[in-house]
Image (cartoon, helix red, strand yellow):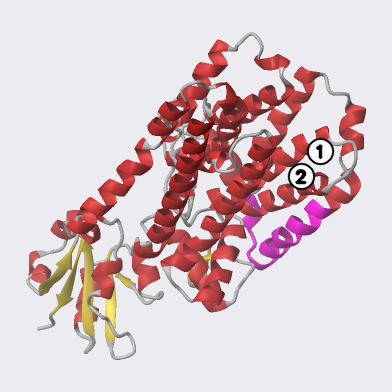
Amino acid sequence: MSLKNYKNSSFYLLISVIVIAVFRLILTAIIPLLDKTESRYGEIARIMYETKNWVVLQIDYGIPFWAKPPLSTWLSALSFETFGVSEMAARFPSYLLALVLLIILGKLAKKEGVSFYLPAFILLTMPEFLIHTGVVSTDSALNFSIALIMISFWKAMQNEKYSFWNYLFFIGLGLGFLSKGPIILVLTIPPIFLWIILQKIPLKSIYSKLPWFTGLLITAVISIPWYILAEQRSPGFLDYFIVGEHFNRFLVPGWKGDLYGSGHSQPLGMIWVFLLAFTFPWIQIVLYKLWKERKTIFKDKYVSYLVFWLFWTPLFFMISKNILHTYLLPVTIPIALLMVHWWKNYEKKNTLLAVGSIFPALVILLFFGAFLTGKLDFYMNSDKYLIENQKIDFNKNEALYYWKDKSYSGQFYSNGKAKTVADTKEMDSILRSDAKLYFVVLNKKKKDIPAEYQAKMKLLDSNYKSAIYLLKPE
């Protein structure tokens, strides 16, 4: 590549990264929290912020949430403390974690003699990573923890003297236990172990290059106290979280023990379809390159390390039917690092940049298309606008009810004031009150409401999923 083309591609990388990062930040502020997952974790953080209960996560007032550790919830709740309650504040920690990762990878890229912005461009044009750059979920914190562990272990193995990387390995483990639990060991230790065996790394070297005693103490201090306090204040947590979430969820098809939803049953092997779709186009390029160099892959310590990191996660989840595409977020980092490592040898760099730009360009076009046509609010999987457009004043004898089940977005945007109507008996009861009654119903469930009650419902607003009514007592 000529110097002129190199400068042009570097400028393209810089501008693209800035545009995509700013666009993604704007989305964190203007897109409502979406049901179910994002608004659920947003509501859990809001309740933590409101109640100041920093130990036991609550999915509703007084109802513990045992499914996940607290790190992502702590971050969102602290953001609420700083900025106030909003979707932007809920998402901002996830956005910051992504930026920190991009900076770390950018520095690694510069040491390989390529643009600081190259890994950021690769990741921000990858669907899975772009989606999670500013989403309220536990996966962002898990991905950050895994990246710290894997990068710091590699760095520790390369350095003769101790540095901050040696301790970051154990800090990453501690954060991993707080982000998603013991699964952190399952997703990091096996690929490291396989790499050690393949490369015949002496155990003495592993022992000497990491501060095991001090490091494990750091990991324990970071993670163990919360687990002890959580079990003390909410007995039963450890059994549900360790056995249910870490064994039954992955090994029992259609697991029925989930207290907070249902298992996401998929055909066996679906994880590979997710991999090809949600890391497009970079996984396809990496796979092609690996195939071409299949005879020398495992002779290169760095490439083999990244290959184990990349393929272990989908191999592990291949045996499970209860999966989501979000489980693949950790593999986005080794894909980016492999692309960076090979970048100098690619001849058609501009073509790769153009293909990589396809997904974010489509997202931006679709967003502005929906915005300009006024359909954005209608197609959002959230009850935000149904609730906020009515300007419900819960301090002035006004109430919000849901038929059968509340949505998490309904809970979040009503500040926990939304209630449910389980049957017609309860409907009769609230109709006898003197409050101004707002009533949200899923469009597909309206038919379940008897006609005599539907006659008392005045439509106020609706979207593709739900509608809000004013209940008119006789």
Is 405 rendered above or below residue 366?
below
Please give left or right for residue 33 compared with residue 388 in the image: right
Amino acid, disc 2: Phe
Tell me the residue that label 2 is attached to: 169
Q: Is residue 92 above or below residue 286?
A: below
**Residue at image point 64% right, 38% down:** 109
Q: Is residue 156 left or right of residue 49?
A: right
Pointer 1 or 2: first along the chain: 1
Q: Is mark 1 in CB contact (under 8 Å) with mark 2? A: yes
Q: Nearer the viewer, residue 28 or 112?
A: 112
Image quadrant of residue 115?
top right
Whether residue 225 is visible, yes or no, is yes
> Around disc 2, counting alpha carbons within 10 Å, would you say few (fewer than 14), some (14 to 19), or many (20 or more)?
many
Residue 375 spot, x, y in % from top left: 19, 57
Q: Quadrant of the C terminus?
A: bottom left
> Residue at horizontal 46%, vertical 32%?
321
Vertical placement of residue 53 versus 42, above or below: below
* Magenta-span inclusion, residue 238: yes
Tell me the distance, in whole angstroms, between the alpha carbons under discs 1 and 2. Answer: 9 Å
Quadrant location of residue 30?
Answer: bottom left
What type is the residue that disc 1 sits on?
Answer: Ala
Label 1 belongs to which residue?
156
Q: Is residue 273 left or right of residue 51?
A: left
What residue is at 54 percent from the left and 18 percent from the top?
289
What secondary structure prevails in the magenta region?
helix
